[in-house]
Amino acid sequence: MLRRLLCLTVLLAAAAAPTAAVAAPRTPGPLDRPLVADLDGDGTNETVRLRETACYSSGGESAPPCPNRDDVFRSIVVEVADTCAGGERMLTLSREMDSVTFARRLDADRDGKARELAFELRAGASGRGVQSKIVAFRTGADGCVAVRRTLFSYPQPQTIGKRPRGTSFSTGGLDVKNFSSRYSGQELRTMESYVRGNDPGCCPSYERTTYWRFEPKGGSYTPYRTRLRKLR
């Protein structure tokens, strides 16, 4: 509900401002073109795509499909579609958000097969709301794609750092890259900020950077380096 109010507030403000031309088409983003790959190893491809759940314009809220214009905001979820069991089966991987930062498959567990999916979504007028995941898949008993394990989920109590005294979590983000030659495969980097009660939204008091590596024995990511920095 709060996100919907924020979207409508931004749209009403935009509608009140003078406009010189008709709204331009929305800039294409990650997953506007679906990602097609065999994620569960059954020999057939699945489709990772966005599903619109609501549209917001100066005229208010409407049902999808959303017009392809940059003055129309939309709520979305990430889903995996699989043609199986006599039809199409959809598996929702995220909660409702507003935009996608990135989405790609990778060999997270280092088994030589790039079948894991990494993605990050953002929400809110400033994009501070975040949901990041790395998900591994399997074939279910019905022959349809299923989640084998969520290898990493951010922000969660086990993936965000301890808050500095007197602050609250503001926002964060995930990067997936080969950050260190000490470890094989790709590592993760999370960067998060913390605010005090009187901090402006642009200027947090602290920032933490943490690096994570995959542990095959435990089947999950563990931190190997972290740094908390006071910004002012």
Image: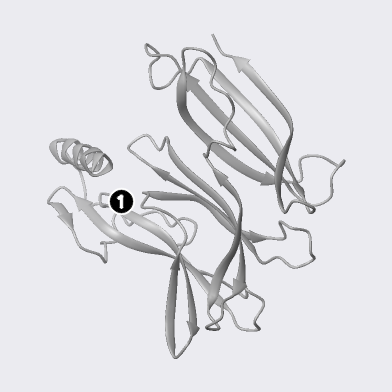
User: Residue 6's image quarter?
Assistant: top left
Is residue 134 in view from this perspective? yes
Q: Where is residue 168 shown, x and y percent of the image?
A: 45, 22
User: What quarter of the picture does the N terminus occupy?
Assistant: top left
Q: Residue at x 52, y 39 (%)?
A: 156
User: Residue 112's image quarter?
Assistant: bottom right
Q: Where is residue 4 shown, x and y percent of the image?
A: 23, 44
Query: Quick one: which residue is furthest to the top in this view?
Result: 232
Query: Quick one: which residue is furthest to the bottom in this view?
Result: 86
Is residue 22 in view from this perspective? no
Q: Where is residue 87 shown, x and y percent of the image?
A: 42, 87
- The three-letter code of the residue at mark 1 reads Asp
User: What quarter of the picture does the C terminus occupy?
Assistant: top right
To which residue does mark 1 refer?
Answer: 70
Instruction: Using a 10 Å C-alpha cutoff, classify the residue at mark 1 as few (fewer than 14 neighbours), some (14 to 19) or many (20 or more).
Output: few
Q: Is residue 206 positioned above or below 23 on the image?
A: above
Q: Is residue 18 positioned above or below 30 on the image?
A: above
